[in-house]
Amino acid sequence: MADPLALPDGACLFHVGLMKTATTSIQTAASRQRKRLLDHGVRYPGTRFNHREPVAAFMGKSWGWVPKAPDMKYWDDLMGEIREDHLSRIFLSHEFAAGADSETIDRLIAEFDRPLYIVITVRPYTSVLPSMWQEYVKGGLTVDFDTWLTRVLNEPPVGAPLSQFHRDHDQARVVKTWAEAIGPERVSVVIIDKNDPGHVGTAFERMLCLPAGTLSKGTARQRTVNSSMSYSEIELLRVLNNELKANNVDSATCRTLVTQGAVSRLLKTQRPKPPEDKIALPPWASERAVRRSEEFVQAIRESRVHTVGDLASLTATGDVRSSDAAETAGQVSQEAALALLSGTISASLGRGPLFK
């Protein structure tokens, strides 16, 4: 019996995210297996580990410390490679596409001369929130966690433009927008299973008609890719962001010092992280996030898209902050402070994060 997830020959599978849903693991596995994928009739175009620059160029999107969107040459080069291959299945992946509106999606569909299929990876909203605050701080955010939670968990006013976060992380909006544009039969939603890290890779193997293990072995090994920092480490980084912005340090220098220096050093020098130093939601935020998750699940069910995994798991409560968490908040270890300082100094000297 044919696999209902399997794409037809010559089709394109576009993995549009969402952010912080094993996207880096999938992209890393695909880029490392680029030649093997092609041997099995799947082209993962380009030479980088994902398709961030082409997708950002098409959407006119900048990110983090980067002040403007990339040149459209990135997109044109990508599409040139795709159009030259009329036989292979095509696999594209970058989570910036999750924020696309209906008009942008229509423009994107028009770019392809082959059937286009969409896959959306999702995880519990309660676990997305701490991860995304961390990513935003890495990219220059100066707002503390609780203030940021209040902003993103407040419902946007009716008729008002959606914030970037509401566009990119409203699971119901993303699924509904793509399903309406391209048809629910061409959209798959894969639910992350934290107890089975190879689950996502297996779903992609099925869609791309790849042998078992081609991607799933890689995603199972990539549990530490894009690894998390502790709450105190992120707070230390946020203080650095505030200091740089208060003193009008330009974006290019901030990117060098923070992204290529402090963040890279903190991630490369693994230190023990006490369980109580994780980024956890206050109870009020967890309750509100679970309610929103329930709405997402209902909308995804009603969308009639393909689903892989347990939809009900999206309503998990996640890590909730204990009442005495404030006593340890902001207590930075000597090792973390040294890593941040060393990485910043090393990057300022043009020697990367590790004085090399």
Image (cartoon, rainbow, N blue to C red):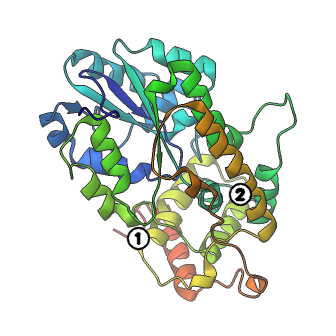
Q: Which secondary structure, mark 1?
A: helix
Name the residue located 62 percent from the left edge and 34 percent from the top edge.
Answer: 302
Vertical order, 232 against 88 (above or below): below
Quadrant housing residue 332: bottom right
Q: Position of residue 79 (x, y in %)?
A: 35, 20
Q: Is residue 84 left or right of residue 286?
A: left
Front one among 129 and 201: 201
Q: Which labelled disc corresponds to residue 303?
A: none
Instruction: Decide which of tag 1 and tag 2 comes sooner along the chain.
Output: 1
Q: Where's the N terminus, which quadrant?
A: top left
Query: Residue 247 in the image: x percent, y percent?
Result: 74, 58
Residue 116, position as x, y percentages in the image: 40, 22
Quarter of the C terminus within the rendering: bottom left
Q: Amino acid at mark 1?
A: Lys
Q: 10 Å neighbourhood of mark 2: few (<14), some, or many (≥20)?
A: some
Judging depth in this view, the residue of 22 and 244 nearest the camera is 22
Residue 290 is labelled as 2
Residue 23, image x, y percentages: 43, 48
| Residue closer to the observer: 337 or 163 | 163
Q: Which residue corresponds to mark 1?
A: 268
What is the count of numbered marks?
A: 2
